[in-house]
Amino acid sequence: MNDLIILGAGPGGMSAAIYAVRSGLKTLVIEKFMPGGQVLNTADVENYPGFEDPITGYELVTAMEKQVRRLGAEIITADIQSVERDSKEDKMICKDASGNVYEARAVIAATGSRYKRLGVPGEKEYTGKGVSYCATCDGAFFRDKVTAVVGGGNTALDEALFLTRFASKVYLIHRRDKFRASQILVNRVMEHPKIEIVFNSVVTSVNGENKVNSATLKDTVDGSGRDLTIDGIFIFVGYNPVTEMLPDSIKDEWKAIKTDINMGTSIPGLYAAGDIRATSRKQIITAAADGATAAMAAYEYITHEEL
């Protein structure tokens, strides 16, 4: 049996693995897809300490993965469906989609989040046909095309700037009259000649014939509508925590995980780190910090010793 199971191999999970292995815990990392999480889709990271120049998300998390493996943590691929505590045996039990069972003294859930959908007509139908949730993945398909980005946070502005490398024009659509992003990004999009900002507007439908050719917008101030001719639309309106496998008793109304200052939940031996936490700032560095904190708390729980 493992001392610790970590669910998810994004920055939070890999940071937890680094601290756990260095503390002497037998650690198993279980990732549904591939190590890296959402950061794999980030073009440039310039707010993670230690790098004078921007580093790609792929480079950053690949270095993290290599560090985790060098230290000796095992990383496997599995789709965990449930996490339960066996109070009689004082252990945590994880079951995957194939029926395999993994046991440990403690579990750190760092399963991250997935992109929110707009939920408007045409979005689902044209996903992969002009609707995308990853400019880094799909931007090159829109060389010399007209695109739109929906959202007003850091991710939306980052992705809009990335799209300017390929697209001839980028509409940046936001439902409010000002952005929620960091000021440095706001300045960059405001000054970029390829970006046209569309404030006080929401997308009510995505339209096309076999592929996207327009989006219908509604003005949030006067209620008027108009069609915007585009070749593609990139949606960045927030995230939903990936917590389906975790007990409902530790979730808030938005399905995020409630934790204390040490990342502990109300279930002994179960911790959470990164984007799935109710108070997460959804930054790479805060996810990594969560992971380190959770690993140290798990060590103390397992060994009854303070680090």
Image (cartoon, grey):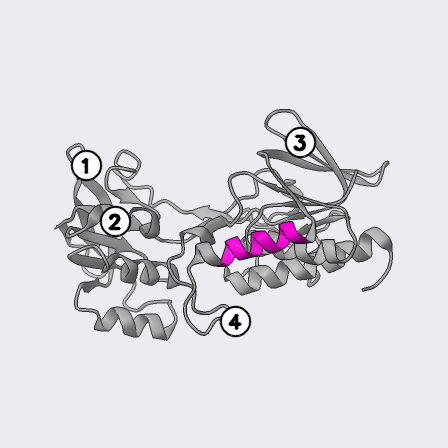
Residue at x 67%, y 60% (from the top left corner): 292
Q: Provide the residue span drawn in magenta.
A: 60-70
Location of residue 186 (image quadrant)? bottom left
The mark found on residue 211 in the picture is 1
Question: Does residue 250 sit above or below 188 in this rendering?
Answer: above
Q: Depth-wise, is mark 1 or mark 2 nearer the camera?
A: 2
- For badge 2, the amino acid type reads Ala
Q: Earlier in the sequence, mark 1 or mark 2?
A: 2
Q: Position of residue 156 (x, y in %)?
A: 33, 59
234, 244: nearer the viewer = 234
Q: CA distance from mark 1 to mark 2?
A: 16 Å
| In front: label 1 or label 4 | 4
Q: Secondary structure at mark 3?
A: strand
Q: CA distance from mark 1 to mark 3?
A: 40 Å
Q: Nearer the viewer, residue 181 or 166?
A: 166
- What distance separates the C-alpha of mark 4 from that of mark 3? 36 Å
**Label drawn at residue 140:** 2
Q: Which residue is mark 3?
A: 95
Q: Are marks 1 and 4 in contact (CB under 8 Å)?
A: no
Please, what is the three-letter code of the amino acid marked with disc 1? Lys
Q: Is residue 92 left or right of residue 202?
A: right
